[in-house]
Amino acid sequence: RNLLNKFYELKAQGKKAFAVLIDPDKVNEDSFSHLIALSKEQAVDFFFVGGSLITSHIMEKVIIEIKKSSDIPVILFPGNSLHLTNQVDGVLFLSLISGRNPDYLIGQQVISAPILKRSGIEVLPTGYMIIDSGRQTTVSYISNTTPIPHDKPSIAACTAMAGEMLGLKLIYMDAGSGAYNAVSPEMIAAVQQSIEVPLIVGGGINTAKKAQDALKAGADVIVVGNAIEERVDLIKEIAKTVRGFNERFVNS
Ligand code: 1GP
């Protein structure tokens, strides 16, 4: 339970964390080693690797490459049970609680459970919530679920509360990769005030300002993927924003 403990310890210390999402379908081979080096230099907290639809065959290669060149924990962000690999340090064991598709609520988990049990990989029980972002995202299409409306913070808060009451240890609110609109600060705040477990927020965070807004509203962990693949140096700006929060805490 090392990784889960890390999420909880950071939260207990009032510290924010930064996860870089690597979607194997979007890896830019020219800048990949720079991305890893910058993540290391900027002390990124986690790598998430995965996506709802993976068409390339390089996922394991990508993970091995990250592990070879950094100590940053690699957490699988699987789209389904076919994406499982034992090269990672942990797996977000996602239940898609914003949706009403039983396959993503419990079906894929039943298929994955014996594989994960054998592998000994750390499992992070996570309530996964898709938030409408202004356009249909791959994740809502593939999962065949309706996202929570962008302007309905109370639905998000009740969903997160239910996930926590069911025993899920993390809540991940996701506007989906490349979202037009990131999750609103109002919704993040409503969810954060309703739960005790660490709150992960991602989807469409493509500037340091949006990262700052999400953290200020109450996200404990922010996830950035697309925008970093497009401009690797954004890692520096976002890491600086996260440090700004953490240093403020240390000085207060
Ligand atoms: C998507 O939360 C992640 O599942 C990150 O989204 O690629 O838009 O940063 P972006």
Image: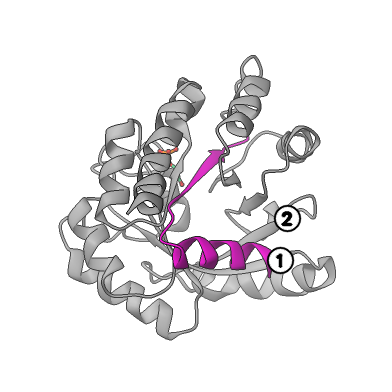
SS class, disc 2: loop
Query: In the rendered image of this protein, does residue 182 appear above or below residue 56?
Result: below
Q: Mark 1–mark 2 contact, CB under 8 Å? A: yes
Depicted 129 relative to depicted 209: above or below = below
Query: Would residue 120 be found to the left or right of residue 112 on screen?
Result: right
**Is residue 225 or residue 246 the one in the foreground?**
246
- Residue that mark 2 sits on: 89
The relative height of residue 164 versus residue 124 in the rendered view (above or below) is below
Percent coordinates x, y for residue 209 in the rendering:
27, 34
Identify whether 116 is placed above or below 151. Answer: below
Number of other residues with Cα within 10 Å of mark 1, as a class: few under 14, some 14 to 19, many 20 or more: some
Residue 239 lies in quadrant: top left
Q: Three-letter amino acid code at disc 1?
A: Glu
Q: Nearer the viewer, residue 53 or 246?
A: 246
Q: Residue at x 32, y 74 (%)?
A: 159
* Residue 189 x/y as whole percent: 23, 61
Hey, which quadrant is residue 247 in on the image? top left
Q: Residue 157 or 67: which is nearer the viewer?
A: 67
What segment is highlighted magenta in the picture? 1-24
